[in-house]
Each structure stands twice: as C-alpha cells, then as structure tokens.
Amino acid sequence: MLRDELQMASGSTVALRHEQAMRDALAGRRTGVRAFLPFFGPAVIASIAYMDPGNFATNIQAGAGYGYALLWVLLAANLIAMLFQSLSAKLGIVTGVNLAEMCREQYPKPMVYVMWVVSEIAAMATDLAEFLGGAIGLSLIFGMPLLAGMVVTAIVTYVILVMEQGGFRRMEILIGTFVAIISLCYLVEMLIAPVEWGNVAKGLTTPNIPDSNALMIAVGIVGATVMPHAVFLHSGLTQGRIRPADDRERRMLVNFSNREVVIALAAAGLVNMAMVIMAAAAFHLGHSEVAEIETAYHTLTPLLGSAAASVFLVSLIASGVSSSVVGTMAGQVIMQGFVGFRIPLLIRRLVTMVPAFAVVLMGVDSTKALVVSQVILSIALPIPMLALLHFTSKRSIMGEYVNGPVIRVLGTIGAAVVLCLNFLLLAQVAGLF
C-alpha cells in the first residue's frame, strides 16, 4: 500500500516537472533543443508500431527472396507513414479529440460500428504479430516452448502497462529505451553483414515488383509500416498532453510535433531498411529460401557468427514486448473512441491475446501467421487513412490548420497507393492473375 502511494507520488512529481518544462518552452523560457525535448514522446511511442515483429517477418522474406529490390517499397511506405502520423498528431492537438472519437461524432452510427469492428480486427492482428515475435525470441534464447514464451511476454507487457499509471512521460521514456535498443542492434548488424551499398542505392530508387509473391510481400511491408492502430493512437497521445492557451502555442505544438514525427519515423524507417539489408546480405545469395524468423536465426549463426544471431534475437524480444504494450494502448483508444467506454486493462489484454494463443495451439506456422497478419493490417489501413484525410481537410473542424492543397494531394496519393496495392492483392488471392 505504502509502496503504491510512493510510486504514484513519484509519478506525479515527474509529470508536474514535465508539464512545467513544456509550459516554459511554450512561454519562451526554454529555447533550442531544450525547448523541443519536453515534447518528444508521442511519435516515439507510435514509431514502435513500425518496428514490430511483423516487420521482422516481412523484411526477412523481402531481403532473402528479392535482395535489395523491395527497399523502395519501404521508403515509400515510410514517407506515407510520416504524412499520416503528422496529420493524426495535428488532429489531436488542434481539436482535443482523437481520430476514433471524431469518427463517432461525425459519421452515422452503422458506419461507426463497421469501422470499429474492422479496427478491432486490425488490433487483434497487431497483437498476433507482437506476441508471436516476443515468444519466438524467448523460445530461441531460452529454449522454452513457444506457448510458454507467449505467457511470459503477456506477463511482462501487462506489468509495463500498469506502470503507465505513473504518468505518460515514464511510458514515453520506457518505449524510447526499447526503440534505442532495437536501433542499436541493427546498427551492429550493419557493421557485421557484408552489405552491397551500390545495390542498396539501386533498390531504394528503382521501383520494381519481380513477381506475384513479391506483390504479397510488398503489401505486407506496407501493412507492417503504415499501421492502422498507430494512426488512431497518435491522435490520442497528443489530444490531452498539454492544452495550448492560444493559437500561438497551438502552432508551436504542431511544429514541434511535425519535427518529432520526422525524426522518430526516419529512425524507424532506417531500422526497417536495415532489416531488409541484413537479410539480403546474409541470405539472398545461397539462402533465398529463408522465410521464417527461426530459420533466419539458425542460419545467421554459421553465416555471420553467434553475435549477429544473438543481437537479432535481442532486437526481436525488445520489439515484441514494446509493440505489444503500444498495441494495447491503441486498442483502448480505439474502443473508447468508437463506442464510448473503457474496459479494464486486464480484460483488454486478454481479448487481444486470444487469436495469438489460438494460432499457436492450432500449430500454424508462426512466421506465415506474422506475414498474414500484416496483410490484414494493410487491408484495414484505408479506414483510418481516409477518415483522417477527410477530417483534417475540413475547415469546420481544423480552422486555420486545415490541410493545404499540397498536403491534400500527397495524402490522396498515399491513400491511393495503399488502396491499389490492396486491390491487386485481392485480385491475386481471387486468382484473377
């Protein structure tokens, strides 16, 4: 009891110091980097969704099967992600309402319920990827059964989520630490792997889809990079972080947010590219059949050494645990926004875990399940993208912060790219080509 009270008091002290730092920055009493740092956090939390285990699965398949050829897909997806995450953050800052709440306010009830169901399915697909990733990493490091690894992952993520009661700044710092661990791991991988940098440049600048299987992987990359739940979550993270006193402060908040989105998602994009580059360098010539995380780990050891394999697993576990935490946070934002009520954290955690445990109990190939989950996310993605573009382009909602012509055009192109990829995938599944 006393320990809980002390933790709450400590959390309150951190929150008060942080709020004062933000107020000082908005008032001009902090300048330069010191003014920006207190606002650094929401995009970092959202960015972990762009480095979840689903990314590992699709990026390994992309690099092993097609070398550096699909890097341009990652670059395009990351640019689209930057645009839509910045719009989501702007919606929360300007209106004080998150994207799911705005949908409930603006759209007819039948449409809202359909959007909620699809978004919940996407949240479950997200949790499937995150739980499986953390469990695979734990099972490979400690030799435990996959199911036991999932239980451990569930317990760890629940404990971290309980910590959120100490204030959002603690959660931002914790998730930021996980992001740093994943980034450092892949920096090490780049130093170990024999990368062909000329082919990397070609892959980034030459759009190419070699075959129909590459198309499915490309859609999976988009689904793993531009995440529906991250688009919903970002507006929730910014809507009540600090209330601007006037338009000057509101504009400062939007500017700070845009900078943070570029930095955080650029880092996430580089990590994703590093995953593909590592897989291409290690597996494409001689081991192009590598398509599973477990196989990648066992193949890395003889090819690049035990250090590379161990670093790979550390990054996978950090990704699984942190992205599972963020996925649950997003699930709460989605449910509360669309239907207007919260459910206890433990129940929320159990609901989204059910599909992941079902997949393992049925004996479904874990990496294949990861890739399929990313395809589901890509199909669900147009809902938040189109809704966000609609709301942020309405002057009646955004006032002077309404999207300009250039943003509207870029947003429309980004949404069109995702929709076209989805239609191509559905046509392929239907056997039309």
Image (spheres, rainbow, N blue to C red):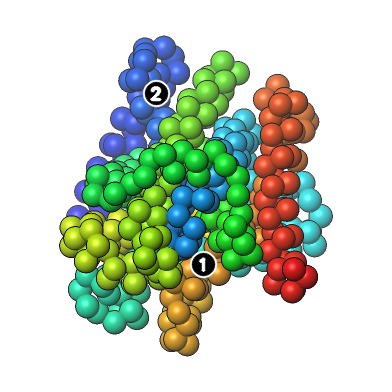
Near-viewer residue (362 or 72): 72
Near-viewer residue (264 or 423): 423
Q: Residue at x 18, y 62 (%)?
A: 306
> How busy is the neighbourhood of tag 1: few (under 14 within 10 Å), some, or many (20 plus)?
many
Left or right of 117 on screen, residue 77 = left
Mark 2 or mark 1, earlier in chain: 2
Question: Is there any visible trace of residue 171 in the rendered image?
Answer: no
Where is residue 121 drawn, in percent x and y?
A: 61, 67
Q: Are marks 2 and 1 in contact (CB under 8 Å)?
A: no
Q: Secondary structure at mark 1?
A: helix
Q: Residue at x 44, y 44 (%)?
A: 199
Q: Height in image: 393 above or below 270?
A: above
Residue 285: quadrant of the picture: bottom left
From the image, tell me which residue sits under label 1: 371
> How busy is the neighbourhood of tag 2: few (under 14 within 10 Å), some, or many (20 plus)?
many
Where is residue 114 drawn, in percent x and y?
A: 74, 63
Q: Height in image: 363 above or below 101?
A: below
From the image, tell me which residue sits under label 2: 36
Q: Secondary structure at mark 2?
A: helix
Where is residue 53 drawn, in percent x and y?
A: 41, 61
Where is residue 227 drawn, in percent x and y?
A: 55, 52
- Specify the amino acid type for callout 1: Val
Question: Is there any visible trace of residue 330 in the rendered image?
Answer: yes
Q: Residue at x 77, y 46 (%)?
A: 106
**Quarter the C terminus occupies:** bottom right
Q: CA distance from mark 2 to mark 1?
A: 37 Å
**Quarter the N terminus occupies:** bottom left
